[in-house]
Image: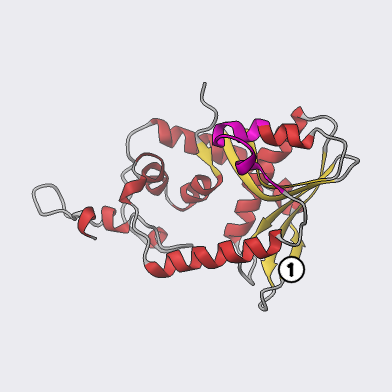
Amino acid sequence: MVLYRLTKSKFIRGQQCHKALYLDVYHPELGYYPSEVLERFARGRSFEAKVKAQFEGGIDVLRACRGINEAPATTAELLKNNNETTLYEAAFVYDEVLVLADIVHKTASGEVTVYEVKNSKAVTDVFRNDVSVQHYVIANALQELPTLSLKDFSLICNDGSDNPLTLSLLDVARDAMKHIAAQVQQFKEVLQGTEPQVAMGVQCESPYACPYQRYCSRKPRGQRELDFNSL
């Protein structure tokens, strides 16, 4: 039984380019990430850790289970109790899409608030899409846990001084539900076919520089192609 075909990051990749989505799933080894990108990832993880530290007593779901395939069931069990609960990397699956929520807080009465952490001062369309796909999965997954209700879905940004600034995006995410559902089906169809043929263009740099540009810019058959082991 297939637990999931897409993840949040792969969904965002598919919004940028279908070919990049396909490569991300089947040939991630072809991706190239320059040092400045890796440094940006590291700064993001550092800010996320700082925010999580403000939610004391949280349980890291990925550390509480034996693998990613067990994480959704572990998350559900941890949320079923009647106590106030905070989870880090809480896992949810719906419509063959897996998302890991940075922070999930549940009150003793069963009200759930989800927080996505971004080390950025600006609220971009990518962040709105990020939250929207998470909301699509989590709102539907929580229907299997009738004692719980989704109270809010918030984005925690950097206020410019490395302090968290919380903004609710629940209404934005609700409005995007049908659009997200349609894109999920589209992306799953992409993954069932052969590698999409997509010409290089503006999507290679927007909203992010695609890690597969070196692969896509290789020379045609019969000419010398890039040796990715030497890059």
In the shown orientation, is residue 190 left or right of residue 30? right
* Secondary structure beneath label 1: strand
Q: Residue at x 53, y 32 (%)?
A: 4
Does the magenta portion include 164? no
* 61 magenta-colored: yes
Whether residue 177 is visible: no
Q: Is residue 89 above or below residue 41?
A: above
* Residue 175 location (% of width, % of height): 72, 48
Where residue 231 sits, quadrant-wise, is bottom left
Of residues 96 and 58, which is closer to you in this image?
58
* Residue annotated with mark 1: 165
Residue at x-position 67% and y-position 41%: 136
Horizontal side of 33 relative to 57 (left or right) equals left
Side of 52 where 100 appears, left or right: left
Depth check, front residue: 180 or 214: 214
Q: Which residues are magenta?
A: 59-73
Sort mark 1 into few (<14), some (14-19) or many (20+) by Cα contacts within 10 Å: some
State the predominant SS element of the stretch in magenta. Answer: helix
Which residue does the image show at 74% across and 31% down from the upper left? Answer: 77
Q: Please give left or right for residue 140 compared with residue 218 in the image.
A: right
Q: Residue most toward the top?
A: 1
> Quadrant location of residue 56?
bottom right
